[in-house]
Amino acid sequence: MMEDAKFEDGGEHPLYLGAESSEDLQVLASLTQDAVFPVTEMTYRASERRFAILLNRFRWEDVGAAKARGRDFERVQSVLDFGDVLKVSSQGVDRSDSDMILSLLSIDFEAGEDGAGRVILTLAGDGAIALDVECINVTLRDVTRPYIAPSRKAPSHD
Protein backbone atom coordinates (compact mmCIF):
# COMPACT_ATOMS: atom_id res chain seq x y z
CA MET A 1 0.00 0.00 0.00
CA MET A 2 1.32 3.44 -0.94
CA GLU A 3 1.33 6.15 1.67
CA ASP A 4 0.73 9.85 1.03
CA ALA A 5 3.70 12.16 1.39
CA LYS A 6 3.85 14.10 4.62
CA PHE A 7 4.91 17.72 5.10
CA GLU A 8 7.94 16.60 7.10
CA ASP A 9 9.22 14.42 4.25
CA GLY A 10 10.74 17.47 2.56
CA GLY A 11 12.53 18.64 5.69
CA GLU A 12 16.09 17.80 4.64
CA HIS A 13 15.85 18.31 0.88
CA PRO A 14 15.67 21.39 -1.33
CA LEU A 15 12.17 22.18 -2.52
CA TYR A 16 11.21 22.28 -6.18
CA LEU A 17 7.44 22.52 -6.40
CA GLY A 18 4.94 23.71 -8.97
CA ALA A 19 1.45 25.14 -8.79
CA GLU A 20 -1.20 24.94 -11.50
CA SER A 21 -4.35 25.47 -9.42
CA SER A 22 -5.44 27.78 -6.61
CA GLU A 23 -5.14 24.83 -4.19
CA ASP A 24 -1.55 24.21 -5.33
CA LEU A 25 -0.83 27.92 -4.95
CA GLN A 26 -1.91 27.82 -1.30
CA VAL A 27 0.76 25.18 -0.63
CA LEU A 28 3.41 27.52 -2.07
CA ALA A 29 1.89 30.40 -0.09
CA SER A 30 2.29 28.48 3.17
CA LEU A 31 5.93 27.69 2.36
CA THR A 32 6.77 31.29 1.43
CA GLN A 33 4.95 33.01 4.29
CA ASP A 34 7.35 35.39 6.05
CA ALA A 35 9.91 35.24 3.24
CA VAL A 36 11.96 38.42 2.99
CA PHE A 37 13.63 39.94 -0.05
CA PRO A 38 15.17 43.20 -1.21
CA VAL A 39 13.02 45.16 -3.64
CA THR A 40 15.91 44.80 -6.13
CA GLU A 41 15.38 41.00 -6.28
CA MET A 42 12.10 41.22 -8.22
CA THR A 43 12.23 40.88 -12.00
CA TYR A 44 9.50 41.17 -14.63
CA ARG A 45 10.35 40.14 -18.18
CA ALA A 46 7.33 41.18 -20.21
CA SER A 47 8.63 39.58 -23.43
CA GLU A 48 8.92 36.22 -21.61
CA ARG A 49 5.75 36.81 -19.55
CA ARG A 50 7.69 35.96 -16.37
CA PHE A 51 7.85 37.54 -12.94
CA ALA A 52 10.36 36.16 -10.44
CA ILE A 53 11.54 36.92 -6.93
CA LEU A 54 14.72 35.71 -5.26
CA LEU A 55 13.62 35.47 -1.67
CA ASN A 56 14.96 34.33 1.68
CA ARG A 57 12.38 31.77 2.68
CA PHE A 58 11.82 30.59 6.24
CA ARG A 59 11.91 26.77 6.15
CA TRP A 60 8.47 26.05 7.62
CA GLU A 61 8.78 22.42 6.50
CA ASP A 62 11.77 22.00 8.84
CA VAL A 63 10.31 23.48 12.04
CA GLY A 64 9.38 20.12 13.58
CA ALA A 65 12.80 18.60 12.92
CA ALA A 66 14.60 21.70 14.24
CA LYS A 67 12.59 21.61 17.47
CA ALA A 68 13.05 17.85 17.88
CA ARG A 69 16.82 18.08 17.37
CA GLY A 70 17.24 21.28 19.38
CA ARG A 71 18.83 23.20 16.52
CA ASP A 72 18.31 26.67 15.15
CA PHE A 73 15.61 27.48 12.62
CA GLU A 74 16.71 27.98 9.04
CA ARG A 75 16.10 30.06 5.96
CA VAL A 76 17.03 29.27 2.38
CA GLN A 77 17.23 31.34 -0.78
CA SER A 78 14.51 30.36 -3.20
CA VAL A 79 13.19 31.53 -6.55
CA LEU A 80 9.44 32.09 -6.76
CA ASP A 81 8.75 32.14 -10.50
CA PHE A 82 5.42 33.06 -12.11
CA GLY A 83 4.82 32.23 -15.76
CA ASP A 84 2.12 33.46 -18.16
CA VAL A 85 2.12 36.93 -16.55
CA LEU A 86 0.33 39.56 -18.61
CA LYS A 87 0.73 42.58 -16.32
CA VAL A 88 2.39 43.51 -13.01
CA SER A 89 1.26 46.31 -10.71
CA SER A 90 2.12 47.21 -7.15
CA GLN A 91 1.00 49.34 -4.25
CA GLY A 92 3.23 50.53 -1.40
CA VAL A 93 6.42 49.31 -3.09
CA ASP A 94 9.04 51.97 -3.83
CA ARG A 95 11.23 50.37 -6.53
CA SER A 96 13.59 53.39 -6.40
CA ASP A 97 14.52 52.60 -2.76
CA SER A 98 17.16 49.93 -3.36
CA ASP A 99 17.53 49.38 0.41
CA MET A 100 13.85 48.45 0.87
CA ILE A 101 13.32 44.96 2.29
CA LEU A 102 9.91 43.39 1.70
CA SER A 103 8.24 40.64 3.68
CA LEU A 104 5.75 38.31 1.99
CA LEU A 105 2.69 37.56 4.09
CA SER A 106 0.40 35.70 1.70
CA ILE A 107 -0.33 34.71 -1.88
CA ASP A 108 -3.92 34.63 -3.12
CA PHE A 109 -5.64 34.07 -6.44
CA GLU A 110 -8.67 35.95 -7.70
CA ALA A 111 -10.15 33.87 -10.50
CA GLY A 112 -11.24 35.45 -13.75
CA GLU A 113 -12.56 33.74 -16.85
CA ASP A 114 -11.18 30.57 -18.43
CA GLY A 115 -8.43 29.99 -15.85
CA ALA A 116 -7.09 33.54 -16.03
CA GLY A 117 -7.06 35.79 -13.00
CA ARG A 118 -4.96 37.83 -10.64
CA VAL A 119 -2.33 36.62 -8.19
CA ILE A 120 -2.01 38.95 -5.20
CA LEU A 121 1.21 38.94 -3.18
CA THR A 122 0.40 40.67 0.11
CA LEU A 123 3.37 42.29 1.83
CA ALA A 124 3.90 43.48 5.38
CA GLY A 125 3.22 47.20 5.80
CA ASP A 126 0.20 47.34 3.50
CA GLY A 127 2.13 46.69 0.30
CA ALA A 128 0.94 44.41 -2.47
CA ILE A 129 2.00 43.14 -5.87
CA ALA A 130 -0.68 42.09 -8.35
CA LEU A 131 0.06 39.80 -11.27
CA ASP A 132 -2.55 39.49 -14.01
CA VAL A 133 -2.03 35.96 -15.30
CA GLU A 134 -3.34 33.87 -18.16
CA CYS A 135 -3.31 30.85 -15.84
CA ILE A 136 -1.65 29.68 -12.63
CA ASN A 137 1.86 28.60 -13.58
CA VAL A 138 4.18 29.00 -10.58
CA THR A 139 7.31 27.25 -9.33
CA LEU A 140 9.17 27.50 -6.05
CA ARG A 141 12.75 26.28 -6.10
CA ASP A 142 15.37 26.37 -3.36
CA VAL A 143 18.65 27.53 -4.90
CA THR A 144 21.07 27.57 -1.94
CA ARG A 145 21.80 25.44 1.07
CA PRO A 146 19.80 26.36 4.18
CA TYR A 147 21.41 28.78 6.60
CA ILE A 148 20.64 29.65 10.22
CA ALA A 149 17.90 32.26 10.42
CA PRO A 150 19.49 35.52 11.64
CA SER A 151 16.92 35.82 14.45
CA ARG A 152 17.27 32.10 15.26
CA LYS A 153 13.50 32.19 15.87
CA ALA A 154 10.41 31.24 13.93
CA PRO A 155 8.39 34.21 12.70
CA SER A 156 5.28 34.87 14.76
CA HIS A 157 2.14 36.87 14.11
CA ASP A 158 0.49 38.23 17.23
Image (spheres, grey):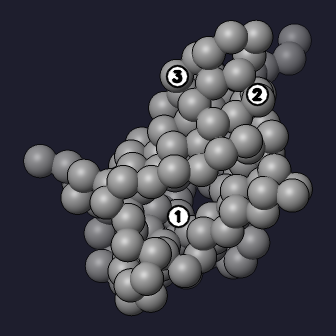
Query: Where 150 falls versus 14 (above or below)?
Result: below
Query: Where 55 falls versus 21 (above or below)?
Result: below
Q: Single out the mark in the foreground, 1 or 2.
A: 2
Which circle's residue, 1 or 2, is located before the other in the chain?
A: 1
Which residue is label 3 attached to? 110
Q: State left or right for residue 87 relative to residue 71.
A: right
Where residue 19 appears, as percent x and y from the top left, is: 73, 34
Type of amino acid under label 1: Arg
Q: CA distance from mark 2 to mark 3?
A: 11 Å
Query: Where 8 falls versus 44 (above or below)?
Result: above
Closer to the camera, 129 or 103?
Answer: 129
Q: CA distance from mark 1 to mark 3?
A: 24 Å
Closer to the camera, 52 or 70?
Answer: 52
Q: State left or right for residue 56 relative to residue 135.
A: left
Counting other residues with Cα less than 10 Å from the Cα at mark 1, is it few (<14), some (14-19), or many (20 or more)?
A: many
| Residue at position x 87%, y 12% in the image | 1
Which circle's residue, 1 or 3, is located before the other in the chain?
A: 1
Counting other residues with Cα less than 10 Å from the Cα at mark 2, is it few (<14), some (14-19), or many (20 or more)?
A: many
User: Which numbered dot is residue 135?
Assistant: 2
Helix, strand or loop at label 3? It is strand
Q: Classify residue 67 by image quadrant.
A: bottom left
User: Which numbered dot is residue 57?
Assistant: 1
Counting other residues with Cα less than 10 Å from the Cα at mark 3, is it few (<14), some (14-19), or many (20 or more)?
A: few
Where residue 45 appears, as percent x and y from the top left, is: 78, 63
Where residue 94 appears, as percent x and y from the top left, is: 38, 72
Type of amino acid under label 3: Glu
| Residue at position x 29%, y 69% in the image | 153
Type of amino acid under label 2: Cys
Closer to the camera, 136 or 156?
Answer: 136
| Residue at position x 78%, y 57% in the image | 46
